[in-house]
Amino acid sequence: MLLSALSCFILFAAVLFLLFFGAVWSWFSRRRPERAKWLGALSAMLGCCAGTVLALPAAAQWVPAQHFAFLGLHWQIDALAGFFMLPVLLLGLAAAGHSLGYLQGHGGQRQGTYWFFFNLTLLAMLLVCAAATYIELLLAWELMGVMSFALVAFSFQEQETRHAAWVYLLACHAGAVFLILMFVLAGNPNPGYAGTAVACGLLGFGLKAGFPILHVWLPEAHPAAPAPVSAIMSAAMLNLGIYGILRFLPPVSPGLLGWLLLGLGLSGALLGIVLALAQVNLKRLLAYSSIENMGIAFLGLGLGFLGLSQQNAAMAVCGLGGGLLHLWNHALLKGTLFLLAGAVFKSTGTLIIDKMGGLGKDLPVSKNLFIANAAALSGLPPGNAFLSEIMIYLAAFQGVLSGNHVILAAAIIAAVGLALSGGLAAAAFCKASAAVFLGAARNPRNHEPHPECRLMLGPELFLSLLALASVIFAPWLWENILPGVLQQSPLIGGGSWPLSAEHGSQTLSAVRNFSFAIIALIAVLGFLRHRQLRRKVLDTGCTWDCGYALPTARMQYTGTAFTQPLSDYFRLTLGRHRSTVPVQGYFPQEAAVHITASDPGDRLVWHPLSRFTARIADKTRRIQSGYLHLYILMILIALIAMLIYAVASSLPPAAAPEPALPAAGQLHQNAAPLQP
Amino acid sequence: MNDLLSLLLGALLVLNLLLASASRLRHCIKLVAIQGVLLGLLSLACAQSSGGHNWQFLLVMILSLLIKGGLLPYLLLYTMRRISVRRELEPVVGYSLSLVIILALTGGAFWLSSITPTAVAHGASPLVLPAALSTISTGLFLMVTRRKAITQVIGFLVFENGISIFGTGMMIHNGLLVELGLLLDIFALVFIMGLAVFNINRSFQHIDTHSLNALGD
Amino acid sequence: MPQNPFFWWAGLITALLLAPLLPGVINKTKACFVGRQGPSLLQPYYNLHKLFRKDCIRSSTSCGPLAWAPGLELSALLLALLFLPYANQLSPFAFTGDAFLFAYLLGLGRFALVIGAMDTGSSFEGMGASREVQFAALTEGAFFAVIGFLAFASRSLNLSEMLSCPLPANVPTVIAAVILAAGIAFIVMLVENSRVPFDDPETHLELTMIHEAMILDYSGPDLGFILYSAALKLWLMTALVVLMLLPGDLASAPVLFILHLLGVLLGGIVIGAVEAVSARFRFLKLPQFLLGALCTALIALALTVIGTGGGR
């Protein structure tokens, strides 16, 4: 016991040391890019490996939870912390490797700067997971926001990137303000503040986790950041919002939280994927799909909390476990997809889907990985996301069978919504993989296609293999890890009845077996087909195209055209967001449609809000006259007003029935006897 | 026999969805006619499941088959042809959204009937109350969201059909009297409407109620 | 209800062997309706035999998916076949939640086909694929609503039990609900299999097709794989509708087996009749129609819930 505590402490210190000194050292050697690069990358990788050694046993509950003080602050590493640390570490490892390839060509001092912020971002994310109390959480949270802001702003020469980075910074700070409010209110003994504290907590953590409407920074920051950074942010940082909710949210009734998360999750899942469909920027599409997947996870958690409030064990376990499992699966798959988007960007120099096409011939491995991961992320069977989605479906259908009519209605709507979002996700990812990798190149390349970069391919393969492994180990994970992880959350654990994993584990192992049956069947059929065709004449010709002999690349369906019916159906293309060049004459020369789907959160909430603020600011600017006398007068007025308020509120309670002051008076009375 | 009753009520529920998504005027009128026929059959089914007052139910059935299933739709079609109105409905709310709203209203109807005490809610079948409420709200919804004057009459017909479902299904005492009164009412209404719409059309060349708003001042 | 696994296996093998017969039945029915003699019932078998002997030509634009998509689709469907309770005998592969795996396996097959279609870079295939994903996404919702109804009516999450359970006698509204839900399942079947009125498999214009437009570039054994998978899918979904309508306690296993077989063939005749008398819908109206199907399935669920009464 002591040994494990000691080794845990040493490992934690080592991770901190490696990441921190790697960061600082590469910053100081930024004039020598080569050295800075290897220093930063190696320290990040080593730190991540050491962290994995620390987090894995904690998550798997091979060692008991550890609490210790370090740097005068309190840290704890238990199953919940370990579970959320693991994606950070694995993604950090992969992203560090990928960055080596992605940053090739960035000379000068950029390498040192990048690795400084990269390592510190990783460090901050780990600290968020390990925080034991509010103080550590707030410190680490703010550090995480600022460091990742610098990473988002990495290519600050572009106007769009700067804009995205500012939006991101604003969102981070708004989140931090809400969190501070939450902690202040939660510490207040007055029970009237509990509701507000929970609302602040949900807003603060929701800003990070991508609640619908609060998600605005996501589609801005992800396309702007370098690909490995987007991978980390989307796959691991979003999860931390949920981690915060599970660990630090003030006590709230599971029923209320369940309904909230269910509503947010359903709207987030549908909104995210519908918007993803209409995007033309590959990374923006992936970012919206992250909102969708976070929504699915919320949906699962919401169903789980509803199950908790209904004392429905099967629904609670399947919902909560499915939600957490989906976070894990999404982290692996979305991480890989962002890294692949980075590889595509390096190869083509653009992220606009409609300008690509036919990349599959230049990047064959990337193509296969992308299609496989995209299919898995749409929840299709041999992939790992199906495992978590089926658990969430099980939770919803337990709700359908539960007998309570209101829960039944909510659960069936959740299940149908999940099915719809699954179908739409398949459409969105068909669009992404087809328009980028398949068909013929739409724009002629201005450079020779170079072979795939090994440094970038390795991490992508690594994450894909992890995804495959998580299919194999999912039942084990479900039985041995998730109950312990869930117990650690104050919102779930400490309940009157224990969570057991017996619900769903049978389904999971059956699904795993069938997943491998599919893979085996595909292999057998492929072999049969191969044998059949070996004796045949195998000919290649141009695409048939209904007899038209001279098809050109411009005649293909573009990504926009592919999803245009769906985005029209969901009214994303109203008004100025759609511009068409209509078909004219018998031999039309030109016809086009451009669709830019503006974010409804942006359009309906944030823009009016900012206009409103600006108007108020305009009005109040008149006070700013520039005369010192006026300022002094204002200070005087304010002082007098405060004085009047203080006098009025310190009158006896009968005269001024404010609730706050009697409480303060009581405090004095309590304090008095202590003085002697 | 309960099966027939619940089949009819289920069909009435689905008919509401069809009404919400019908885009052609003629189609809409046909659906209302079908609703009238189903209503007639409903009173037959109620009569069979209850036993008593057979001749009353039979009378209601014949009357509603004749008037709601035949006469009123014919009048509507006749008006439609006379004023040569365009066939599309010109909804304020899109058809898909209408469907979702009708579904939500139906869900609300089910919820309402599940919280009403069983003794009140269960007339001939537990489905009567939801079907009636859903039809009533569909009628109101159609009146609110469709532009043409003639569709407002259709909406009113649907609304009235909902009330009839309630009356028939609950087997209200002296239901016959109420039913006959309603029939007379609606007949007069459709007749007057026909005249009014025809006259409006003659003076303004269209029957878009939105354009009538300008007359307000 | 005594279980007899023999009849389940017989049902599976029948499905594998007789699946290509179903398109034959449909075509024959259509031909009869318009007064022609029509192709032989066995024509699909001849077609498959011919295709498997043929050579293969491949688009030069392709970079791989075109080659593996047919195999993937076929294997997804073969696996999905394992979960239906043929002749109302519980499937030996059934587990809690297999209904979702069933639905997603169909989704996997579709994904493979769409990716394969986009691989050729053909504008027609792009058009077909675009329509396919659009309608499939909206059908998915209706299908899950039907599953929700089945789960509630049978109190089970297992496709075998859902489809083979006897009708709950104490629920007065269940017959209406089952008929409604089976109607929706029939519509889902028509959409999934690209039949009239949602898609016209036999029009001469590639512009107006969905499924057939996606497979323009396949030839030889690959096309054979795809045709066979399409036939399997048709059989699968028709059997699903038939099993929804066949209560499990109706008769003994052999009789049920015969009934189920006849039901599927009758389903083929019904599809043929629908195709003969109706025209294809406008594509623009389809999403609305599918949404209506989803709403109707939810109403079927509500009917059952209200019929069950208590519990609240």
Image (cartoon, grey):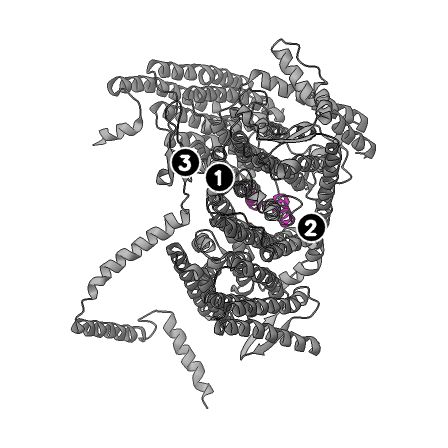
From the top left corner, tell me how far across and down residue A211 is, in percent. Answer: 48, 54
- Which mark sits nearer the N-terminus, 2 or 3? 2
Say whether mark 1 and mark 2 are on the same chain. yes
Which residue in the protein does label 2 denote? A504
Q: Is disc 1 on the same chain as disc 3? A: yes
Chain of the residue under label 3: A
Viewport quadrant of the N terminus of chain A:
bottom right
Give x and y (percent) for residue C217.
Answer: 60, 29
User: Which residue carries the number 1 mark?
Assistant: A442
- Tell us which disc is closer to us: 2 or 3: 3
Q: Amino acid at mark 2?
A: Gly
Between disc 2 and disc 1, whose residue precedes?
A: 1
State which region is magenta. Answer: A387-415
Q: CA distance from mark 2 to mark 1?
A: 47 Å
Residue A399 is a magenta residue: yes
Say what amino acid the circle numbered 3 marks.
Answer: Val
Residue nearest the viewer, comparing A61 with A170: A170
The quarter of the displayed image where residue A453 is located: bottom right
Between the residue at mark 2 and the residue at mark 3, the CA separation in whole angstroms equals 47 Å
What chain does mark 1 sit on? A
User: Which disc number belongs to residue A593?
Assistant: 3
Mark 1 residue type: Arg
Residue count near mark 3 (Cα–Cα under 10 Å), binned few <14, some 14–19, many ≥20? few
